[in-house]
Image (spheres, rainbow, N blue to C red):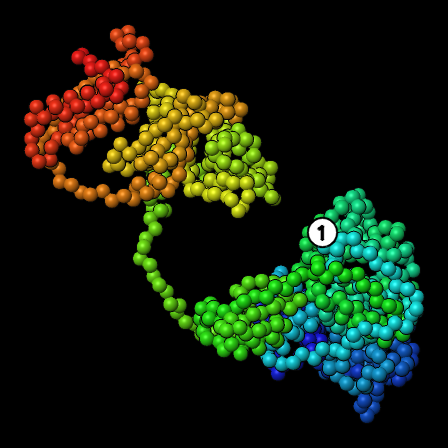
Amino acid sequence: MKISEQWLRQWVNPNNSSEQLAEQLTMAGLEIDDRFAVARAFSGVVVGEVISVKQHPDADKLRVTQVNIGASEPLQIVCGAPNVTVGMKAPVATVGAILPSDNGAGFEIKNGNLRGVDSNGMLCGASEIDLTDSIDGLLELPADAPIGMDIREYLGLDNQILDISITPNRGDCFSVRGIAREISVINDLPMQQPEIPANVAATDNSATPAVTVSAVEACPRYLLQSISNIDRSIDTPKWMQDALVQSGLRSHNFLVDVTNYVLMELGQPLHAFDADTIVGDIVVRLAEPSETITLLNEQTITLTGDELVIADDKGALALAGIMGGQRSSVTDSTTNIVLESAFFNPLAIAARARRFGLHTDASQRFERGVDFELPELALARACDLITSVTGGQAGQIVRAESTENLPARAPIMLPITKVRDVIGIEIEPAVMVRILNQLGFEVAQQADSLICTPPSYRFDMSIREDLIEEIARIYGYDNIPSVLPHLQVSMDYDDTADLTHQMKLALVDNGYMEAISFSFSDAKIEALLDDKALGEVLALANPISSDLAVMRRTLLSSLLPCVQYNLNRQQPRVRFFETGLSFVGQSISELVQTPSIALVAVGDVWDEQAYQNRALDFYDLKHDIEQLLPAQVDSARIRYERSKLAFLHPGQSAKLYIDDQYVGWLGQLHPNTAKQLDLPATWVAQLSLAPLLTLVREQHAITTPSKFPQVRRDIAILVDSDISLQTLEATIRAAAGELLTDMWLFDVYQGDKVPAGQRSLAFALIWQDRTQTLSDEAVKTATDKVVQALTEQHAAQLRDS
């Protein structure tokens, strides 16, 4: 936003240079992008009055003029401007004057001779003194311009323009008033506001149109005032034109200029309707689907139905808070207007301007939030300017308000000690109160806290940290010394990342590659992996694409598309794993996030080789899973159960438990599911990281190896086929006692020599006593106990051979 320093200093004038003022604003969070004078440097140009004009004797387009610049003798200047006339006042570059040039060096005015006539200076147009030309010829100055006065001083060309970068949260600073308020607080100075009448007395008995607001949530405050019999022969005053031009706005006509002036001065967008074009009453409503309106820029747009419009009985008059319509636009012949001043909810304006490729000063402010208490003051200011300059007659103000839909300014409690904790220094409570009061907050002190109610123009204030930031920036960041914070260092080391990395390396050693993907997944894949045991799926309110529309309940939702992608590119053997969060729950409040590790494998056990290969099976996947467990873990603590997940093969899947705690599942993807995903036999697993990390973190005591020998005894038994191996192993361990140091299954047989429905299992049992050498009798007794337990509990039969 560009703003005139001269205009700013009319509101508050600290004893600072332009550079110091810019530095203050930047340090207060209002960064100065640029600072420049109204016109480039030049010298020797004064106000002059043309006292005579004669035709050049030897040139049709030249005139010989006598110009009074307040010296003892008038200057003779040859001039080619077509608009030079007797009595006009214009800038005069005297001999020795330096005028600006494109190369930056400037050029000097010297005595000259044009076709035999001496010329002692130059009458200047706007471009010669680095202003914008509006006419072809001299820059005509007002009749009351003081003769001989330096033109830079008269036109205010040394005035600095501040180009301020306003952050999105500071909509209150999009005006002279907002910036002046900041400067007054920083410098602890009062702000000199212009005298604005509370309201302009109504002198026109003609009725202002009635107003109905149907979209009260989008527009809780709407004001209208009619002004009639406006004298359009009166031009925009020069002071107003200068203020607008120096703020980066073009001067149009007086009525438009007034609304722009109030916009820049107070920050309240206004809109003027031609009263003679309004049919019936004014209605503030949502647009009808497919309704059209032709805007002031001659762009015809088709509305979708969620835009806010100002309408009459004939249709839409304006796109609320963005741009007016052409039908009711103010022209040079308009003498009767209806002036609008309103508060629009930022959410009702946001994104609508961009939807139609529009970006206006009004939408820029309404999207960020305009002071909801400002409309009446701005309306009074505009009405006062119009009636005082043009003699127009004001009508009654018509209001439509819904106070319950206006923004609520909730008090914020600020513990005084919290300011010290965050900023790092002690600031007197009285200083805090002064700063906050000057910023417009209502402050009450209760015990050791400040209860602060934000003003109506500070939409960005909601938590105590916001208040602390306000105190710090006004107190001055330069005034806050660099102090080392008091840190309580905890020597506790979180080894989660390191241990997880070790698991990843174990999988890499087994041929897996890590995948990194989004936490979002395709709802179609989630539907294929649906199972009540997984929980509910959370749909995204604003997905970035249709195939990333839900939060993944399982990491498979991310890995399976990776497998599809690789298979489609002639990669027959795929191994992937991923660590990340799985999400279960239908709402944010009940969402459960679980750190997990997932695996997926397709293809043969090994890459293509010269010797015999085979397809991956359940036991290969089980082996890969167990590589994540510590080598020294007691296998008795690990248990598998048949899984009933709907998307897994019922005979080729299992649930994993560690110390009876459910960890996850593994197995083959159900053939029907794999077929719908166009996948071959696919092996998958997902485990929760927390119990795995707990197991890995366990401290295992170092024990001295026994110096007494081990004894091995093998037993072979016949049991029913439906008795699981881990059930038999648990029975063996319970019966064997402490002397059994290790065991394993080394043979499985089902065939002609084994009865139907049974199988032969051979176990190796390792016996050892740490205090003495075991006798044959002791080993036999222990082994007999194992056989007896298997016989009694599982009807096992000991095989002799």
Question: What residue lies at 79% left-to-right and 80% top-to-bottom?
Answer: 92
Residue 515 percent across, percent down from the top left: 44, 37
Left or right, 276 with respect to 169, comes to right
Using the rendered view, name the quadrant where residue 138 is placed: bottom right
* Residue 232 shows in the view: no
* Quadrant in which the C terminus appears: top left
Q: Looking at this view, name the residue that lies furthest to the top.
A: 752
Question: What residue lies at 65% left-to-right and 74% top-to-bottom?
Answer: 181
* Dot 1 amino acid type: Arg
Q: Is residue 455 above or below residue 643?
A: below
Q: Looking at this view, name the residue that lies furthest to the front.
A: 792
SS label for mark 1: helix
10 or 654: nearer the viewer: 654
* Quadrant in which the N terminus appears: bottom right
Q: Label 1: how many residues lie within 10 Å, few (<14), some (14-19) or many (20+)?
A: many
Q: Report how many numbered discs are placed on residues in the image.
A: 1
Residue 668 percent across, percent down from the top left: 42, 25
Residue 492 percent across, percent down from the top left: 32, 55
Using the rendered view, name the quadrant where residue 650 is placed: top left
Left or right, 444 with respect to 799, comes to right
Question: What residue lies at 46% left-to-right and 36% top-to-bottom?
Answer: 555
438 or 330: nearer the viewer: 438
Question: What residue lies at 68% left-to-right and 54% top-to-bottom?
Answer: 347
Residue 681 percent across, percent down from the top left: 44, 22
Q: Is residue 743 above or below residue 99?
A: above
641 or 553: nearer the viewer: 641
Task: Quickly name the residue at label 1.
Answer: 352
* Residue 699 shows in the view: yes
